[in-house]
Image (cartoon, grey):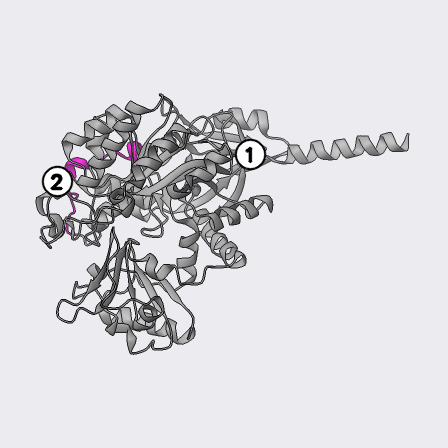
Amino acid sequence: MKKTLLTFTFILLNILILQAQKTCFYNGKVYTVDAKNSVAEAVVVENGKILFVGSSPEARAVWSDSHTKMVDLKGKLVLPGLIDNHTHFADGGMYLLGVDLRGAKTIAEFKSILKKYVDNHRGEWITSGNWDHESWEVKELPTKEMIDEFSQDTPIFVDRFDGHMGLANSKALALAGITKDTPSPDGGEIVKDPKTGEPTGVLKDAAMPLIYKIIPAANAAQKIKFVERALQEARENGITSVHDITFQPDLIAYQDLEKAGKLTCRFYTRLPISTYQNLVNTGIQVGFGSDKIKLGSLKAYADGSLGSSTALMFKPYTQNPNTKGLASDIIINGSLTKWAVDADKNHLQLSIHAIGDSANYLMLKLFEKITQENPKWDRRFRIEHAQHVRFEDIQAFAKLGVIASVQPYHCIDDGVWAAKRIGDRVNYTHPYKSFLEAGVKLCMGSDWSVAPLNAILGIYAAVTRQTVDGANPMGWIPKQKISVQEAIKAYTINNAYAAFEENIKGSIEVGKLADMVVLSEDILIIQPEKIKNVQVLMTIFDGKIVFERK
């Protein structure tokens, strides 16, 4: 009898615990992003899933009891949890904990910030940084001489914010064995002084690993620290899912945090295409994993970036007629085609970085080849960035079902100087409206840490196209502006689709994962230029409030 009573008590306690997990969010404007773009007032969640979507009176009448937590939204706008389609998540946490050079507006500020950091980390490798020479008074690439004077005993390799070139000091170059006689690798460039032939310290794209390979890797504890800092940044910005460029140590950290119950963001991972055979050998296909960590997508590079003049263009750069940019080494040596065809045959998703007009064309031709050679399946090709796409090639995106995976902040940032690089080719730069009009699925994100992990800022950029220098109040290439509703879809349900997850998230509907965000202003009705000032008031992940702005 005593044993039976104890068992009954245990069951009752568990029932009460489960009941206590129920939360009713009411008195809000809930923009559901369902097929009808319905607007509701209340959402009830239980055990990480959405249980009810409807009116506040009905929600309060049915769910207001001692086992339900009641949260008054006070009329604020509620959206599905925001999804970022392109992050370097662990690296983003590392950047937040390291030296920040993005704010330097002059060479003197760049040197001062870096010197102060070196003084406090003498003898250690100094990496990350995120500098941008286009923000300086003299818009020329930095050199090792700028930083050698205070870093003779400290190796430095700090990236430009786009991640496609970095600056090394003499100490780092010496440790890597890079001299005037070192040739540039395929797909990269060791920038050299035209008079002396000596390396300037700047390495572009495929030349960067010459130094990366000698930098000590972060240990497991450091990697966890980076990810935890990045998770905090995501919570504060209402980001509940990311499509991440993931390396094995990152994946291990995500899995460890999932086991510990500490993940407050979902990860759709894209592993390097060079490692695809590991997934094939273990039978992993797209969509493998839990609702918090999924595998089965691959990342590859077709070219570099516009800011580094390494995006692959059909015609020479206006600013530097001696180059058309750089094709990646795996295009040059044929590996990309071989790997991509085989990976697709094994139902792994291809997600390929292409920025220049030529790079985008080449990837479309590769995707066309794959569809002709391989059996048909729901493959959902992605081109990451898709920044400079000739209008005649947009139809190929639609025909092949290629997702345009874009990052709007690049538009308002690059728009300050892009015309200097490529002249009137900017007319088909970031062609968001043209993509949508052609029926192309458009999904959006940040490319963090290249740009801020802030989807609200991304929506602002896509809707206004007002460049960060204030020079384009009506929008840079205004015919490519899109509506707020279209931008919200690109950060929610379209991103879910791009990860084969539209049936479990991306909209506020019964049965879906209970990820939501509450905003300080209604971005559907305020003036578009005011969207950039809107804040996240509350982030709800798995039905739990994981961030609340005080």
**In the image, residue 203 lies at what x, y percent?**
26, 60
Up/down of 179 relative to 276, above or below? below
Whole-percent x and y of residue 273? 38, 41
Quadrant in which the N terminus appears? top right
User: Do we see residue 544 in this rendering?
Assistant: yes
Please tell me which of labels 1 and 2 falls first in the chain: 1
Left or right of 316 on screen, residue 141: right
| Left-right relation of 535 to 43 | left
Q: Which mark is residue 341?
A: none
**Which dot marks residue 48?**
1
Query: Compared with residue 397, is residue 416 higher up or lower down, i.e. above or below?
Result: below
Give the image location of residue 21, x and y in percent: 61, 36
Q: Residue at x 35, y 37 (%)?
A: 339
Q: Residue at x 35, y 35 (%)?
A: 350
Quadrant in the rendering for residue 381: top left
Q: Residues within 10 Å of mark 1 (few under 14, many from 20)?
A: some
State the residue at coordinates (14%, 30%): 392
User: In terms of secondary structure, where does tag 1 sit?
Assistant: loop
Q: Is residue 524 visible?
A: no
Q: Amino acid at mark 1?
A: Gly
* 186 shown above or below 527: below
Name which residue type carries label 2.
Asn
For disc 2, the marked residue is: 427
Q: Nearer the viewer, residue 467 or 68?
A: 467
Q: Which residues are magenta?
A: 471-488
Of residues 44 and 195, which is closer to you in this image? 195
